[in-house]
Amino acid sequence: MRLSLPGYFAVGAAILAGASCSEPSAEAGPASGGPARAGGRATQTLTVSASDITIARRATLVDGVPITGTLRPIETVQIRARLDGDLQGVYVREGDFVRAGQLLARFESTEQESTAQSAVADRVAAQGELATAEWNLEQSQQLFQAGAIPETDLRAARNAVATARARLAATNSRLRTTSMSARDTRVVAPTSGVIEKRLVENGEHITRGGAMFTLVRNDILELAAAVPERRANAVRVGQSVEFQASGTNVVGRVARLSPTIDPTSRSITVYVQVPNANGAIKGGTFATGTVLSRTISNAMVIPQSALRQTAAGNQLAYKIEKGSLDTATVEVGVVNDRLGIVEALSGVSDGDSLIAGNVGSLAAGMKVQILNTGKGAAGGAGTAAAAPAAGQPQTSTR
């Protein structure tokens, strides 16, 4: 969720100017709607600081699904040896950026190169044998048509051509194999990325399949997050996701969704991809974010701390009206636990002053006195007084 709410927690001092300047006498009786003490004693006065009061304001609110998780590189590649041999050179170290096809290491290749040259020579010889056999076949066909040779000689010529073609195919296959073996003496990067681990050194003997390097592609990071079943339908592929990772705000998108709900956790896995072209965010960074689902214009927004739950399960807010507390039942809409704010669908109006701090027990009708914080509090707001004389309002402080 995003919230553009300048001055949200500013104290409406002018609204509360009369908060402490009209304390009733014992004879005046309790305020309208407020509880009176036995024997006709006056209503209690609640003394609060400026930070305990918030002003309800309208703002644009973005509804979304909160997610958390670890950002990991989109691809991690284990580079292994394709042959058994001695390393002639290793050319990269941890942290080096490499491009696809870049040479990382080289094996001693004398044996492979000799074998490849032998295979080339064998192919040339096989091609010559095939050419000779095909010429002999052509001559034999002409002689057979003229009646100069028997049919057995013609068949022998045909078999010689077939044999030469098979021999050429075998040499081509051997050449491909030896060429691949010679190529495997050069270890190259399969994709662009950063060398995370270098596991070999110059001159080391490596067995076939031995681990040599770990390469990570971190130009895109991916986060796998669990979303509760009740919010699963609010997440779709392509939705934007706002992230905060390592003090940096980034925007990603939902790339994939798990097709099933996990029977144990009753959640689905959401895969979010975050662009990281300059590598500013490191793989393994913990991130918190919100999948943005809808924007609510002109929403009435209040902090969660301004709500108190009743025994019946209703959400209650205490408003300051004409220096006294009044209660309002609030219907809650969108909740943003990460920012600690909620949308008030009813019960609160723009500009209402609400008690948002932990100030102890509250009751409708209590008088409100604001402590003088030295920051321009409204006139009449002073420091908490000592215990009042008999017949004066009792003061309840934090």
Image (spheres, helix red, strand yellow):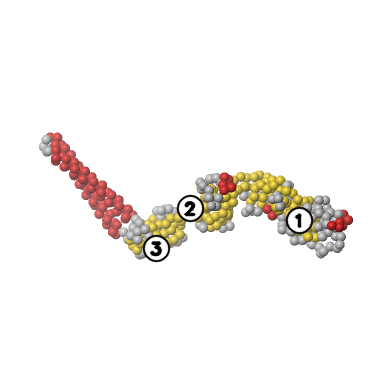
Give the class, few, some or many, for how many residues have Cα within 10 Å of label 2's Cα (few <14, many ≥20).
Answer: some
Q: Tell me the tag on residue 74.
A: 2
Give left or right: position of 311 versus 255.
Answer: right
Q: Earlier in the sequence, mark 1 or mark 3?
A: 3
Residue beneath the point at 57% across and 48% down: 229
Q: How far apart, in angstroms, are the residues tagged by discs 1 and 3? A: 70 Å
Secondary structure at badge 2 equals strand
Residue type, mark 1 in image = Leu
Counting from the top left corner in percent of width and height, residue 100 is at: 42, 53
Identify the image quadrant of the C terminus: bottom right
Q: Kindly give the residue lying farthest to the top in the view shown.
A: 146
Q: Quadrant of residue 106?
A: bottom left
- Is label 1 or label 3 in front? 1
Residue beneath the point at 12% across and 38% down: 150
Counting from the top left corner in percent of width and height, residue 243 is at: 57, 53
Q: Earlier in the sequence, mark 1 or mark 2?
A: 2
Residue type, mark 2 in image = Ile
Q: Tell me the tag on residue 200.
A: 3
Residue named by callout 1: 362
Residue beneath the point at 73% across and 57% down: 52
Counting from the top left corner in percent of width and height, residue 14 is at: 78, 53
Give the class, few, some or many, for how many residues have Cα within 10 Å of label 3's Cα (few <14, many ≥20).
Answer: some
Q: How far apart, in angstroms, are the residues tagged by discs 1 and 2? A: 53 Å
Secondary structure at badge 1 equals loop
